[in-house]
Amino acid sequence: MAVPFSYSFRNLLRRRVTTTLTATGMALVVFVFASVLMLAEGLQQTLVETGSYENVIVVRKGSTSEVVSGVEREKAAVVETQPEVANGPQGRKFAARELVVLIALPKRGTGQPSNVTIRGIGENSLALRPQVRIAEGRTPRLGSREVMVGLSIAKRFQGTGINEKLCCGMQEWTIVGIFDAGNTGFNSEIWGDADQLMQAFRRPVYSLVIFKLRDSSEFEAVTARIDGDPRLSLEAKRENFYYAEQSKAMAKFLRILGLSLTSIFSIGAVIGAMITMYSAVANRTSEIGTLRALGYQRRNILAAFLVEALLLGFFGGVTGIFFASFMQLITVSTMNFQTFAELAFRFTLSPAIVAQSMAFAFVMGLVGGVLPALRASRMNIVESLRAA
């Protein structure tokens, strides 16, 4: 017969101080573990949501990001005439030629310079990104030296307010608007007219061509035609997939860093759980002997103490996740390894992270409790009763 669950639970309540201290140690480790996973998840989600499944980005073959890509005007014209490109509101092809370059701007507060993405847009660029809306001011006029900045840029960098002047590409640009792109990477960009920016930065080629598919099922056909044309030397990818690829290196680095840190911290939490459980065994020697005398088997005693250890892990896991959930209120920024530009994003808690964090907490409890539980199960009945 099994030892009742309530027995294990009550024993933890009887040792409130040691239970609280041990669970708190586990909670801190789970907090760090979950926070790092949330950081990586937030980065990936921001870049994935930047793109649309219906849109296709065409860049130079082998380019790792938009910044190092180049698409000549003649090639851009060929891409725009593909039959799979949807027609826009005025009967024109629903496509846009864009330029992506980096500039350095000083941060608010510190004044330290950081790379920022400036995107040259075309007539259809805003229509292709319906998630972008004007939060303040207006959109820049095409053919003018006007720009608008993302909400994250306006909050984090000096000189990026409405009607302020931005000096880059040996030209002065007037900020006429601030746009909100939601939880996407566009919030960390500055947008202006592509042709004007090409002249200012002396760039003879565009960085990419983006267009909307007439039918999403035609993606394979247009991709095969563009990728297979040796004259173009271009490759086409769905926009959401393209930006998802941009996050892989950074997200992988964050996860490896998080696992390394939490592995080190978890050693202390496991030792704490082990000390707590060994103390429980030592203080309940006669109790263990009584249970054995009543007919409980060694495996029942082992299971009862393992349940206590797992309960410690459960309390620590729930507490750690609870406090980690408040990290979603924080927006952080870091350098994107692919573009070398600053990217702002939020911590994101997902069901998968909750499950992984709880599993990690249970593993800590199990590892910390298995040796004391084995010791308790192997105690001699007579010797245990004599200890009373």
Image (cartoon, rainbow, N blue to C red):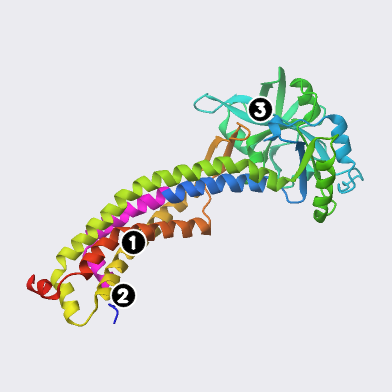
**Which of the 4 image quadrants contains residue 75?**
top right
Q: Quadrant of residue 13?
A: bottom left
> Residue 309 appears at what percent x and percent y?
30, 63
Q: Nearer the viewer, mark 1 or mark 2?
A: 1
Residue type at mark 1 is: Leu
The numbered mark at residue 366 is 1
The residues bearing labels 1 and 3 have C-alpha atoms spaced at a distance of 50 Å
Quarter of the image with the N terminus in it? bottom left
* Count of all numbered marks drawn on residues in the image: 3
Q: CA distance from mark 2 to mark 3?
A: 61 Å
Magenta-drawn segment: 5-32
Residue occupying image coordinates x 77% and y 43%: 236
Q: Quadrant of the C terminus?
A: bottom left
The tag earlier along the polypeptide, 2 or 3, is 2
Dot 1 or dot 2, earlier in sequence: 2
Along the viewing direction, whichever of 67 and 296 lies nearer the viewer = 296
The crowding category of the residue bearing disc 3, from other C-alpha atoms within 10 Å (few below 14, some 14 to 19, many at least 20), is some
Residue most toward the top? 170
Q: Which residue sits furthest right?
A: 91
Name the foreground residue: 337 vs 334.
337
Residue 102 image label:
3
Lower position in the chain sequence, tag 1 or tag 3? 3
Judge from the rendering whether residue 215 lies leftward or rightward of residue 384; answer left or right. Answer: right
Q: Is residue 31 magenta?
A: yes
